[in-house]
Image (cartoon, rainbow, N blue to C red):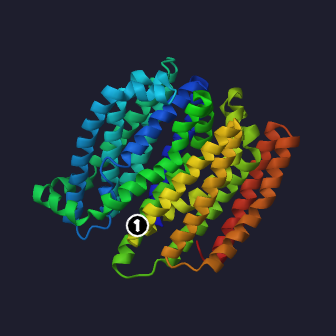
Amino acid sequence: MRSLASLAGGAAVGQAIAVLATPILTRQYSPVELGAFSVFSTTALLLNATNSLRYEMAIPVAEDEEAAGHMVWLCFVLVGAFSLLLGVAVWVWGGAFCRLVKVPILAPYFWLLPFTTAAAGVYEALNFFAIRRKDFASLAQSRVVQGMTQASIQVGLGFTAVGTIGLVSGDLVGRVASSLRLAWSGSFTAILRRFSLAGIRRVAVAFVRFPLFMAGASILNLAAIQVPFLLIPVFFGAEAAGYYFLAYRTLFLPASFVGSAISQVFLGEAAERAREGEPLAHITTRIFLILSAAFLPLYTVALAGAGLLFPAIFGGRWVEAGRYAQVLAPMTLVWSLARPICGMLLVRDRLKESLAFTVFELLGIVAAIYFGQRSGSMYTTAIYISLSGLVVSITSVGRFLHAAGVEFGPVATRFGILLALNLPLGFLVWGAAHRASLLGTLAAAVVGLGVVGMLSFKFLRREKLL
């Protein structure tokens, strides 16, 4: 719990900086510019899923420190080679790609993509090595550094009205800064001592199952989440993509950063316990229900009141983003509960299952966008995406809990009680949003969050989960 508090706290601070900067960014950059940035960041995320062939995911479960160090060096080599090839591809086809996805304003800055992908790949390798060593203090600090650097550059350049390049360069420099923070930790000194070509070849062969199964599963999983940012501008234009991106960023990023922090602590702890033959059901149940108590009130408020709150917070031109946020809230909630415990399949070495299920997930999202664009309505498309993601996320939660050996009945009962505690909050905020002023809605949300938080805390204490 101390490790969790350290890493989640750092992630929360870093994300809080980004969230606080968002109302400024939405007044500095247009929906079209934000839509172009969503295409850039989505492409970088998808490429990062394969630039080291997912060998970094084997670092926490490697049998000893020597093998783990060799694995980090293997990732560095693969990321470097991939970035060079990507640079050539961008030079030849970058402009054509930007025209294909209907964001030609991105073309002059697309050459930054290989650098962003390289920075992201290096950070991932250092990140998993720090997880193995439980160096959560450095991980927390790297999150803060990334949030501060990215927000400072994006806001600073926004005042000069440079356009999309301000968002893209801020993202890149933030990634570089967070990688440097991890590289300066004591963990990197341990990595430097492990360099050996023979050792690198040995771990590449010993853990070849990770590129065989996890690389494909990772890129498909990311594609299932990120593919809307590539297809929405094609079917509905860059402006609609900007609205969707703001809704996604606001809903997903807080849970993504905090959930990622918890996932990393959980993965390190679960991998160690699994190696020692200890049961994993209790720790998995505990994480799932604590997160349920934390996230349910937030997404209840989003579901009930985002339509009014978004334009008030981000500016009048973002009304449509608030409508998208409302329909995406249920999917985001369940996804936020599934993400932190997804490492259970890795710990249990159920890699083939992960690959097969991810194919199903991607097909569901693509089908949702296909039928949505046939309706001609972006709002309808957002509903289809949310329904598809909700089904997949609920199924994923069941898979992860089963892999941990958790009994579904007691967990479902406790989750149902937490859900019931949040229903009055939803009705309160919805009523205020339709009948009261903005200040009345904010007051209802704040008071309701406080009451529900107190009741949820008491429930967790009574169940001996805190």
Position of 196 with respect to 230 (left or right) is left
In the depicted structure, whether residue 163 falls above or below residue 49: above
The outermost residue toward the right is: 435
Q: Is residue 183 above or below residue 425?
A: above
- Which residue shows up at 63% across the image and 75% down it? 411
Q: Measuring from the top left, give residue 143's x and y in whole percent.
A: 43, 47
Q: Position of residue 81 (x, y in %)?
A: 23, 42
Decide: is 366 above or below 107.
below
Write the residue at 67% across / 54% down.
330
Q: Could you tell whether 264 is left or right of 239 in the image?
A: left
Quadrant (top left/top right/bottom left/bottom right) for the C terminus: bottom right
Query: Foreground: 295 or 398?
Result: 398
Q: Amino acid at mark 1?
A: Lys
Q: Quadrant of residue 320?
A: top right
**In the drawing, does residue 346 fall left or right of residue 199?**
right
Q: Nearer the viewer, residue 236 or 414?
A: 236
**Residue 166 in view in this figure:** no
Q: Residue 124: x, y in percent?
A: 35, 50
Q: Is residue 307 visible?
A: yes
Considering the numbered disc 1 on the image, is that residue within a helix, a strand or a loop? Answer: helix
Q: Identify residue for label 1.
A: 352
Residue ID at (51%, 17%):
161
Determine whether, in the image, residue 199 is placed left or right of residue 353.
Answer: left
Count of numbered tags: 1
Q: Residue at x 49, y 34 (%)?
A: 39
Mark 1 surroundings: few (<14), some (14-19) or many (≥20) residues within 10 A: some
Q: Position of residue 34 (x, y in %)?
A: 55, 30
Say above or below: 276 vs 215.
below
In front of the other: 166 or 242 = 242
